[in-house]
Image: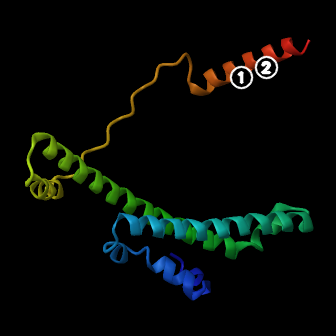
Amino acid sequence: MNKAVLNSMTDAERRLVAETEPAAMAELDEDELLELHARIRRARSKYVKSYRRSASAKVGARSSRGTAYAENQRHRDKAEVFELSLARVSRQVGKAAAQAAAELKAERLAAARGEAAAPAAAKAASARAPASPSRKRAVTKTTGGLKKDASSRAQGARRQAKRDAR
C-alpha cells in the first residue's frame, strides 16, 4: 500500500488497516473475522460514498469531470486502501468458513456412524487434508445465453403490456 496514503489516515483508520495484516488475522476466529469484515466494509463505503458525492458536486462547479477528477484523489486513495484490506479479510473469512464447514461435516459423519470420540480424530485429519480444487460450474443450456433469454422475456412482457393498454 502507498505509505503516503497511510500517513494521511487517522490513527483509528491506520489501526483498522493494521488489523487486516495476515499476522494479526491469524489469531481471529470466524466470528471475529466477520466483525472485522463489517468494520472494514463500513470504512470503505464511507470513503467511496464521500468520493462520489464530492466528485459529483465538483463536476457541477467545474463543468467537466476531467478537472474535478484530480481534486478528489485523497478520498479515492483511501477507498482503495480499504478495498484492498476488505479483500484480505474476505479471503481469510472464506478460509475460516471452509475450515468450519469441514469440521462440521466431519462431526456429522462421525455422529451418523455412531462414533462419539471421532470428532477429535476428524479434526486432525481435516487439518492435514489439502483444500480440494474448485469444480467447474455446471453449464446451463439456454437458447443463446441468459441475457438473450431475459431480453426476450422482457420484450414479450412489453408487447403484452402494450396490448393490455388498448
- Residue 56 found in image quarter: bottom right
70 to 166, vertically: above or below: below
134 to 145, vertically: above or below: below
Q: What residue type is labelled 2?
A: Arg
Task: State if disc 1 and disc 2 touch (CB < 8 Å).
Answer: yes
Q: Is residue 115 left or right of residue 49?
A: left
Q: Name the residue under label 1.
A: 154
Q: Name the residue under label 2.
A: 158
- Residue 154 found in image quarter: top right
Q: Which residue is drawn at 55% across and 71% down?
A: 81
158 to 118, vertically: above or below: above
Label 2 to label 1: alpha-carbon separation: 6 Å
Q: Residue 87 carries which label?
A: none
Q: Which residue is drawn at 40% across and 69% down?
A: 32
* Circle 1 residues within 10 Å: few <14, some 14–19, many ≥20: few
**Residue 110 seen from this side:** yes
152 to 18, vertically: above or below: above
Q: In this view, does 65 lie to the left or right of 108?
A: right
Residue 43 appears at what percent x and percent y? Answer: 60, 71
